[in-house]
Amino acid sequence: MTLRVRGLTIDHGAIRAISNATFNVPRGSITAIIGANGAGKSTLLRTISGLKRATAGSILWDEIALEKLQTEQIVRQGIIHVPEGRSVVTELTVHENLLLGGLWRLHSHKSDVALAIEEVYQLFPRLNERKKQRADTLSGGERQMLAIGRGLIARPELLLLDEPSLGLAPLVVEQIFQTLSDLQEKTGMTILLVEQNAMSALRIASQGIVLDQGRVVIADNAKAIMSDSALRHAYLGY
Amino acid sequence: MNLINTLIAGVSIGAIYSLIAFALILVWRSTRVVNFAQAGQAAFSTYIGLSIEKALDNFWLALIGAIIAGLVVGAFVEVVIVRFIVKRATSAATATVAPVIAMLGLLGIFQGVMGLIWGGEYQAYPTAFSRDGISINGTQIPFSQNDLFVLLTVVVAMSIAALIFQKTSLGLAMRAAAFAPEVTRLSGIRVSRIRTLGWAFAGGVGGLAGVLVAPTTFIAPNSFDLLLVFGFTAAVIGGLDSLIGGVLGGLALGIGLSVVTGYLGGSYTFMTAFVLLIVVLLIRPQGILGARGARRA
């Protein structure tokens, strides 16, 4: 399955967040969308997952037009969005948060949901230690692990990750990115990663897309973007 | 009247306040609307119960009928009215007041419709149990078989609710949707359906409360307005976000008001509830049982 975005335009009231964006997300790899704060990165992910409606253009998941579907239906296509801000349900326990991620397929795939939860515990052993604690007792890094874990319970084909590094210590960021990279290699899933932390994201990605004020300015090999100093200066600020 | 008797007398009415508080909190958590129309919904459901009672002369069928009527009316109110008011209200300048005024308006509509169908006068509602105080060693206490029935019914209903919320997939979805609707949607759950279920569930609990309290208050289109005030006070005492808090708040309020009525007289009861409501809002807006800043399931 390939994600193809064609001529996508998204408005926030009177403000144009994304303007005529066209790009592909090749299957079985990590694509990083980078760009400054306010470049429209989160809006793009929110539109792919159906939380927000596009003004124009299409989002194709193979032959399926996602822009016509509801969020709940998009989840059922194997597309899982982990929004920014370590979004977990703080009032629920760690285990309940993971179970929530598999609730929609609990009737049909009960044993696989249980297996997926076990796999997340192996991936993030600290969640296993805290499974009965409420999510608001977790540290920032643990919460981010739980947010990603909640997404993994659905066994996504395409994982949309929004700013997983936001507000976390460099060491924790390193650990989470390494886990994501290993996980991608192991499962072959497609990851679309939105990041302000361009270096960390490009290091694990095979493709990079640079957004600037709602426009796609570069879509290229991640290594090529990293090694192009003029480009880095212009759009990534380092 | 000694203190123990006064406390006992407050328990069964407190249990009914708990039910109303539970229904208000359930709706508040899922939709952020204080459902003032709850009093009208409960009265409507109780009238349906009374009609069944008159037709079939069976208290239990009437009870079940009132609960089902409550479920249906609750779902109807959410699907037909609340959904649109909430959607519209988010963008308007009147966002915070619009749902409140709308629910008050809806209460008025309910009362008008009930007046047209069943008339405005107070009607008696029968009960399956004696309302005379139980005698222990020859002394009568202010607690009847009916009070015991009310208390046990509330305990059973709340236990079933607790089981659903803590042990089932539906309960997990309801809790998640209440506290984090977006993450819940992104987990593939149809949050709007869960919300409708929450309103239905609250309506059913309101219908149950109506049948339990109607033998005492009688039934008229506006006979549950006071109950709504007490239920709301109980909900605020419990912190508005905590179902358990609301249930405990109801019991505490029932007992507290019983003490006031017993020692100062019935004319102080209503005033005391309001004073309590204002004091709680001033001193601990998060509720007596609500944790500081945090919300509890």
Image: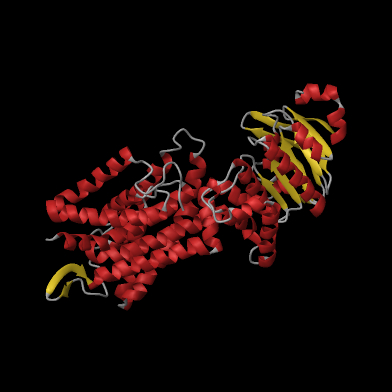
Is residue B122 visible to the viewer in this orientation of the structure? no
Seen at 49% across and 35% down, the residue is B92
Q: Is residue B3 left or right of residue A151?
A: left
Numbered label tally: 0
Residue B217 falls in which quadrant of the image?
Answer: bottom left
Residue A35 lies, in percent from the top left, at 74, 30
Report the front residue among B88 and A102.
A102
Seen at 19% across and 51% down, the residue is B269
Q: Quadrant of the C terminus of chain A?
A: top right
Residue A134 lies, in percent from the top left, at 53, 51
Residue B274 falls in which quadrant of the image?
Answer: top left
Q: Is residue A65 left or right of residue A140?
A: right
Report the front residue among B56 and B235.
B235
User: Is residue B12 positioned above or below B177 on the image?
Assistant: below
User: Is residue A232 positioned above or below B202 on the image?
Assistant: above
Report the front residue among A185 and B19.
A185
Seen at 39% across and 62% down, the residue is B205
Residue A24 lies, in percent from the top left, at 82, 41
Is residue A151 visible to the viewer in this orientation of the structure? yes
Seen at 14% across and 71% down, the residue is B140
Report the front residue among B87 and A95.
A95
Residue B184 lies, in percent from the top left, at 59, 51
Q: Is residue A12 left or right of residue B214?
A: right
